[in-house]
Amino acid sequence: MKRILVVLLIGLAIIASGHSNSPAQATAAVAIGAAAPEFELPDLSGQSHALKTYRGKPTILAFLSARCPISNLYKDRIKAVASDYSKRGVNFIGINSSADESLDELRAYAETNQLNFTILKDEGNVVADAYAAERTPKVYVLDAEGVLRYRGRIDNSQNIRLAKQHDLRAALEELLSGKPVTTADTQAMGCIIKRASDLAQSKTAKPAPGKTTKPAPAKPASASAASLPKIVPLKPAAFADMLKQRAGNVVVVNFWATWCGPCVAEFPEFVKLDNEYRAKGGVRFVHITADDMSDLKKAAAFLKDQKSNAEQFIQDTEDPQEMIDVVFKDWQGVLPATFVYDKTGKRVFHRLGIIDRDVLVAEIEKALKQ
């Protein structure tokens, strides 16, 4: 029986800024079928571990977070995979790539949650950069020769009750059986990993007038359901029709979630822009939350607190990949994500990460003139 090493890389949500692509995309992603980068990192007690010492066995690398809410929703499932596959020769090693999680915090996290695998510290997010890993949770499966055979999500839903497609387990089973991985590349939804460079910038950057550098925490849902804003379920198959119904307007679609720090941080700017363009006309702002249906009241309470008058939807699907496929196939699941459509419904701009107000306004004005 072949043995597998499962490497868990633990990252953290980021208040992202800047470009249309996610931070990790500055480094080219490792191609399926290519050799995976080697690395050597210390564990939480200072002992060094090199990936090459595990060569000869299939290997799984997964990025997780001690703080990301979505990553933590997968915590028990990851532990279950570790337990199940350790009986078949599976080894687990965790790696923390977050720039602002200390060793003491990681030790406490591992002890509190009884993590059944070794954790390594990726100072300077060197390993995260080498693998172009941009969010948590996300997994990478290597074969015995160190070649990447699978990259993507653990399963299809953050809600364990809706998890029906277990991609990680399926990849492991095929690899153990000597078969090629049928589905080799999937998209994972989750929090963006905070890089050391992001942490340095956040310490030195001064907030622009009228802007904030810290996300306002989402308030608990305490208001009655009758007083909360209406959030309409939107199935992926209905996304195109939603755009058609707004033809003749420039449409700004923002994907967000209450558990996403950058989404919460940028939301007040969307409220301001919506109010400005509402007076001018010709622009429709649409927000689509990636929160679970069970958190609908929490999302509605947040919207009420923000005094948002924009159109509100919640993606209605058990598999976020379905929404990605109809919106933008190159979208890797990063939140927040913002898309601008012209008056004919053609996508003319996208930003994967927190918005730049001036850039977004310029794109809206350009679309209005077309």
Image (cartoon, grey):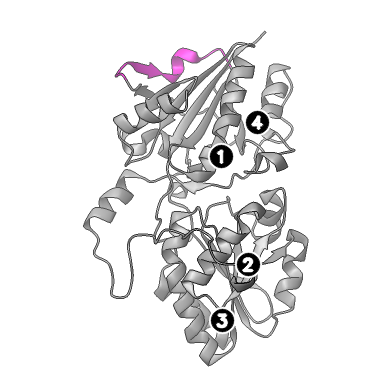
Give the alpha-carbon distance from disc 1 to disc 2, as whole Å.
26 Å
Residue on which disc 2 sits: 225
Q: Earlier in the sequence, mark 1 or mark 4?
A: 1
Residue on which disc 4 sits: 168
Type of the residue with mark 1: Leu
The C terminus is located in which quarter? bottom right
Residue at point 73% right, 37% down?
165
Residue on which disc 3 sits: 367
Give the alpha-carbon distance from disc 1 to disc 4, as whole Å.
16 Å
Span shown in magenta: 45-57
Task: Relative to 133, say whether 45 is above or below.
Answer: above
Give the alpha-carbon distance from disc 2 to disc 3, as whole Å.
37 Å
Task: Kindly report which numbered mark, 4 or 2, lies closer to the viewer in this rendering.
Answer: 2
Task: Kindly report which numbered mark, 2 or 3, lies closer to the viewer in this rendering.
Answer: 2
Helix, strand or loop at disc 3? helix
Residue on which disc 1 sits: 73
Task: Kindly report which numbered mark, 1 or 2, lies closer to the viewer in this rendering.
Answer: 2
Give the alpha-carbon distance from disc 4 to disc 3, as whole Å.
41 Å
Q: Earlier in the sequence, mark 1 or mark 2?
A: 1
Type of the residue with mark 3: Ala
Helix, strand or loop at disc 2? helix
**Horizontal and vertical percent for residue 7?**
50, 25
**Label 2–label 3 contact, CB within 8 A:** no
Mark number displayed over residue 132? none
- Left or right: residue 91 versus residue 179 is left
Type of the residue with mark 2: Ala
Residue at point 60% right, 73% down?
227
Crowding around mark 2 (Cα neighbors within 10 Å: few <14, some 14 to 19, many 20+) is: few
